[in-house]
Amino acid sequence: MPPTSRKTGEHASGCLQGGVVGLQRSFPLCMLLPSSEPSVLPVTETASVEEVTPGEGHQARGVSSHREKCEPKTDIVFLKVHKSASSTVMNVLFRFGETHNLTFAFPIGGGNQLSYPHHFFARFVQGFSPRSPQRFNILCHHMRFLQPEVQKVVSSSAVYFSILRNPVQLMESSFTYYKGASAFSRARSLEEFLSQPYHYYNPAKSDSHYAKNLMTFDFGFNPNGEASAKRVQLMLKAIEASFDLLLISEYFDESMVLLKEILCWDLDSVVSFPLNIRDSSTKSPLSDTIVEKIKDWNRLDWEIYTYFNRTFWERIDRDIGRERMQREVKALRERQAELARTCLQGTGSVAPKDIKDSSLQPLQHGNAKILGYNIKQGLDKEMEHMCRRLVTPELQYSSALYKKQFARKPHQPVPSQRGSALRHKLEGTQN
Ligand SMILES: Nc1ncnc2c1ncn2[C@@H]1O[C@H](COP(=O)(O)OS(=O)(=O)O)[C@@H](OP(=O)(O)O)[C@H]1O
């Protein structure tokens, strides 16, 4: 069943309500219908894809398959699963949040992770207080998911989504990026690790999750649990109960089209350049035998991935259709190519040593060589800002947004055109 299977009953309003195993929140999900929550963004008449011209406009507009009114969603939880293109998705959320003056649930002190690898607690969020709980628009930093705590910092109508990656490529990426982790540091290669994993892997170590079922771990489950049919079913149902949408990094562009559909955003809001990508010199080819060993070793991740890969396409068939999806993906790619021509020096990503602006230097980690971008010289101010944001690595962007959100500006009036709910949230965080 698709990720929306928790929609087990239909309301008089036409909304479908959830209710399955492990359900931690229960509210109608009418994602393409107007929300009852006040919003900063205007209710927009949605357009068909034929009206989405590549290169058109930079404002958020609702674009949906249905000629219905839909309101851009501004309350979002993104589970940033490791090594799954999550930094690229985070950049999309950062840009949308910045453009629309939304608040982020930042890690305390402006760190980069919400006390990962511990399960998430609301108290890890800067500005959260149990005595005067406040809600943030977007929660998207690395965390180990725990929904009852997440619910304390976001609106009950928040859209929950995440992104998954084939565990084979994910582990190959993780092995290189987390080469310093205890399980990997003594193994000369992934082959060597997989030849006798328990020689290297000790589940009791605090960083062992990087080496086995990393997605399962990030979703909050035990990565060392037995992969029995019953356990797998419970896990899949629990994920379905909590998440509105599971994206697939192998189909990144299709994922972005689906995302903007669910969030009622326009195409320009989901454009991106791939971030946190490795130079091919630090990628290892994998033999068929190794591929099978990785699948076996990460059985729980494999079950999650194969299940939600299937439901991803079922969702596309149900909500968008393959033909429209193809047209939208084409439009998205054209827009991204146009942005690359406008923004970037050269044709794309460059090695870290060739990045001229040090503020655009991505974090280098483990044995991975992480690529970055150079922006064209001579762009006008507005364009330069837009291009810079597209290629600003996660740590620098997060830190800039944190400073903005928590800047002491006692005399700065909150713009009157913002919705009152949003104004309240912003006032609460600017302390
Ligand atoms: N748009 C797009 N499409 C497909 N794949 C993409 C995309 N953007 C980033 N990537 C790949 O995602 C890997 C980095 O994942 P994360 O950003 O989640 O890593 S991290 O956990 O935040 O460090 C990293 O994988 P590896 O290169 O294999 O390491 C990136 O290449």
Image: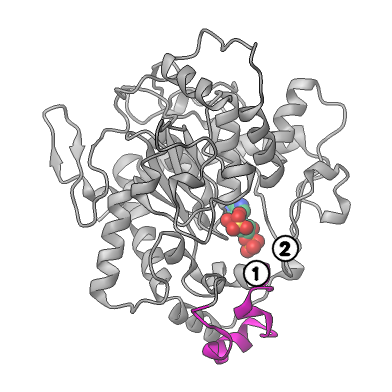
Residue 365 vs residue 289, the one in the foreground: 365
Vertical placement of residue 11 versus 315, above or below: above
Q: Residues within 10 Å of mark 2 (few under 14, many from 20)?
A: few
Please tell me whether residue 179 belongs to the stretch shown in magenta.
Answer: yes
Image marks 1 and 2: residues in contact by CB distance under 8 Å: yes
Q: Amino acid at mark 1?
A: Tyr
Residue tagged by mark 1? 178
Percent position (x, y) of residue 9?
13, 42
In this view of the protein, can residue 298 be seen by the observer? yes
Image quadrant holding the C terminus, namely top right
Quarter location, residue 288: bottom right
Q: Residue at x 33, y 77 (%)?
A: 227
Vertical placement of residue 233 versus 383, above or below: below
Q: Which residues are magenta?
A: 176-204
Quarter location, residue 419: top left
Q: Which residue lies most toward the top here?
A: 416
Query: For numbered disc 1, what is the local secondary structure?
Result: loop
Percent position (x, y) of residue 306?
38, 66
Q: Quadrant of ligand 1?
A: bottom right
Q: Is residue 176 left or right of residue 136?
A: right
Q: Is residue 250 left or right of residue 180?
A: left
Which of the numbered marks, if any, corresponds to residue 365? 2
